[in-house]
Image: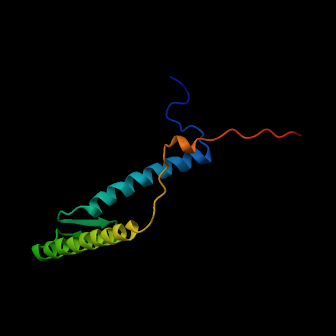
Amino acid sequence: MSESEGQLQDYSVDQAAGAVVLVLGAIAGLLQVIWMSKCHCKVNLCYLFRCERRPPTEEEMKSLKKKTQELKDAATKKKDEDDVEDKGTPRLVPTKSKDLEASPEPELGI
């Protein structure tokens, strides 16, 4: 057996920091999934942080749908107003006319 078995290797500071960030990111991702879930659950993080998540009631769902519809209507109304304002603005459209071909520059007699 080799002598290095069972011993930690020497790691640089940036490698150790990367490992810490990787582990903390995994834990944060798991907590985010739990936090954003709509199911009934209780989260107890070392008795420092407690949270209880419940799904929205029927009344809350109706108010959320109504609010969503109002935001969509406002967005489409604003878009329609922008389209009306744009109709008065002239647009520069390139033409493919032979009359507009570049003519050769005259030679300068220097």
The picture places residue 56, in percent across and down from the top left corner, at 16, 71
Q: Vertical placement of 29 versus 71: above or below?
A: above
| Front residue (pair 19, 78) | 78
Answer with left or right where residue 82 lies relative to residue 57. right
Where the C terminus falls, by quadrant? top right
Image point 28% across, 68% down: which residue? 76
Q: Quadrant of residue 32?
A: bottom left
The picture places residue 26, in percent across and down from the top left corner, at 39, 51
Image point 49% across, 43% down: which residue? 96
| Front residue (pair 19, 103) | 103
Q: Quadrant of residue 88?
A: bottom left
Q: Vertical placement of 61 versus 34: above or below?
A: below
For the question of whether residue 103 can be seen, the reply is yes
Answer with left or right where residue 56 lies relative to residue 72. left
Q: How many marks?
A: 0
Residue furthest out toward the top: 1
Residue furthest out toward the left: 58
| Front residue (pair 22, 106) | 106
| Front residue (pair 80, 21) | 80
Q: Quadrant of residue 35?
A: bottom left
For the question of whether residue 47 can be seen, the reply is no
